[in-house]
Image (cartoon, coloured by chain):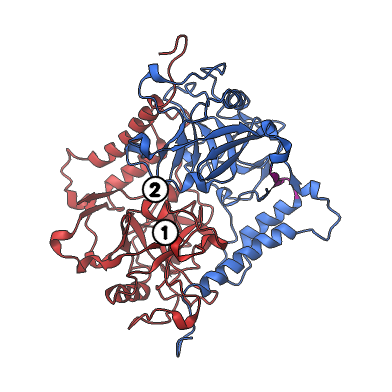
Chain colours: A red, B blue
């Protein structure tokens, strides 16, 4: 202890901050442990058919696909995955505070890898009819949408008539050219920075990373325009892409995602909004949609 | 060209997206080039006394310090930098979608590096009086603050009476323990993910990274709790930290930052709000404070 002063260097403060934040997470994870609410009401196990696993040299990225938002694109992606289209293709782009993107790096159309039996062109699936969809709204003033909340675990914006996936950290979209129908899922991107919500309703969104996003977000940034890598040596290969249901049962991880329509998730939102831990001397009492991420438990 | 289909793979779409976004930046950079407005009204050169340079093995991070927001903490940091406190200390933490942090990794108080003549304890500088401050407000609905905008290039929130730096991507704050006065600037963090705005008004904010943030944001994530590195071998050292005014004139980069109180910046905000490029079939017509970053030109 320094004379005349309290220690305030790391790791003391670090550990305390850790404890505070861990306490929040922990209280979420054990919330209602004493109640009669069954785990099935709180945690859901995603359909393996809706899991896309990208095996990278550093680890596996697991994406929960969202057929409810972009059924045609998700089906097309599954087709390409099953025909091994993505195997060996690289992450072609890492733009700081924006996106990481993968796909065919061929410079000429003649050199493009075949997408096999997948559709070359699809109609855009930028938004969907809000009618009949169970949207769990969040009380958040939002810069971009009149209503925000969650649908089946995915962050959304809505104008009441339609809804769309919000470009929060970790969501996965279909890269395209200028023409709205120029994306087919053969090139995908993930948000790795502050939510670029101006992209909402302008791209077909196909899912959200539920595990391993650090393998994409901590890649060295590409030094070419918009973060594209300038040489093949700089890129990271996708060793293999698989749909979850094609993985042998014995090799599958147990995945539990907190249901966004559960009371526990409401409690989680409440906790994150009010920040009652001692660290927060000026709690905001507010929360933004992209600062809420449904908790995931992964058991290998 | 594939028969019967337009090419939509990378890099075609990539290049087009590049062009679109580059066009925005370009139009900003040359805006008013034909006007009588002098460059001095548009671009400012930060005071070298307010520049903090962190030399890392991968490159240099340049931070513009904000004495207007946290004068005591900024002064304390300058003292420590000049007494070579930071030289050789590591980046101790990289937590995905949150912060990178540097400081003394000593596990025991006895092992802490001396902070020399710097103050061990300072009063918090979490917010400042809004009276008399030239806040350039942005028309943005904000989840956390009643008013948002810029003060001297820094993103802020305000309640009309006080204002504070908003935790946007790239802002730099003083790490602390639970006690509000437990930070002194010897450990600093930078936001590397979606803006954790719940931290607003809870930490003393000392600046914003204006160049080289990719050297911090793309670090491998720490695998310990809250992204702390678990062994010294995993950390990245700060080779040297310097205040800009201590660097010989001949070695200084030319830095120009767009004035946030300039017409050009208003045009930039307008461009980013309305996204009139052909790519955007559903422009939002809205903008969020943390999706606006004052353009910086760096000439080495």
Q: Position of residue B12 (x, y in %)?
A: 52, 75
Q: Chain of mark 2?
A: A
Query: What residue is drawn where x is 56% and y is 48%?
Result: B290
Query: What residue is drawn where x is 47% and y is 46%?
Result: B217
Q: Which residues are magenta?
A: B253-262
Mark 2 Cα shell of 10 Å, populated few (<14), some (14-19), many (≥20)? some
Is there any visible trace of residue A27 in the rendered image? yes
Is there any visible trace of residue B228 in the rendered image? no
Q: What numbered label is drawn on residue A156?
A: 1
- Is residue B259 highlighted in magenta? yes
SS for dot 2: loop
Q: Chain of mark 1?
A: A
With respect to residue A236, does B214 lie above or below? above
With respect to residue A196, does B111 lie above or below? above
A279 sits left or right of B15 in the view: left
Name the residue tied to disc 2: A292
SS for dot 1: strand
Of A154 and A57, nearer the camera is A57
Q: Position of residue B46 (x, y in %)?
A: 70, 39
Mark 1 Cα shell of 10 Å, populated few (<14), some (14-19), many (≥20)? many
Q: Quadrant of residue A240?
A: bottom left
Q: What numbered label is drawn on residue B126?
A: none
């Amino acid at each position: 202890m320094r004379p005349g002063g309290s220690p305030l260097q790391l790791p003391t403060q670090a550990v305390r901050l850790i404890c505070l934040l861990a306490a929040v997470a922990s209280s979420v994870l054990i919330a209602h442990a004493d109640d009669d609410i069954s785990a099935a009401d709180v945690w859901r196990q995603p359909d393996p058919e809706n899991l896309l696993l990208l095996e990278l040299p550093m680890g596996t990225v697991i994406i929960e696909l969202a057929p409810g938002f972009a059924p045609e694109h998700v089906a097309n992606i599954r087709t390409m995955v099953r025909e091994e289209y993505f195997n060996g293709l690289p992450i072609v782009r890492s733009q700081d505070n924006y996106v990481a993107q993968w796909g065919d790096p061929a410079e000429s159309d003649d050199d493009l890898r075949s997408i096999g039996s997948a559709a070359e062109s699809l109609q855009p699936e930028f938004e969907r009819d809000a009618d009949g969809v169970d949207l769990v709204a969040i009380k958040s003033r939002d810069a971009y949408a009149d209503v925000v909340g969650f649908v089946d675990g995915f962050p959304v914006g809505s104008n009441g008539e339609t809804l769309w996936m919000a470009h929060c950290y970790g969501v996965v979209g279909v890269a395209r050219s200028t023409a709205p129908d120029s994306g087919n899922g053969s090139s995908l991107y993930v948000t790795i920075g502050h939510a670029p919500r101006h992209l909402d309703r302008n791209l077909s969104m196909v899912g959200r990373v539920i595990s391993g996003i650090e393998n994409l977000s901590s890649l060295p940034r590409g030094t070419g325009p918009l973060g594209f890598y300038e040489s093949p040596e700089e890129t990271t290969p996708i060793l293999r892409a698989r749909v979850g249901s094609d993985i042998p049962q014995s090799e599958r991880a147990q995945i539990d995602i907190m249901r966004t329509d559960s009371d526990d998730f409401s409690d989680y939102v409440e906790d994150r909004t009010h920040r009652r831990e001692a660290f927060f001397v000026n709690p905001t009492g507010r929360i933004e949609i992209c600062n809420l991420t449904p908790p995931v438990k992964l058991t290998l």
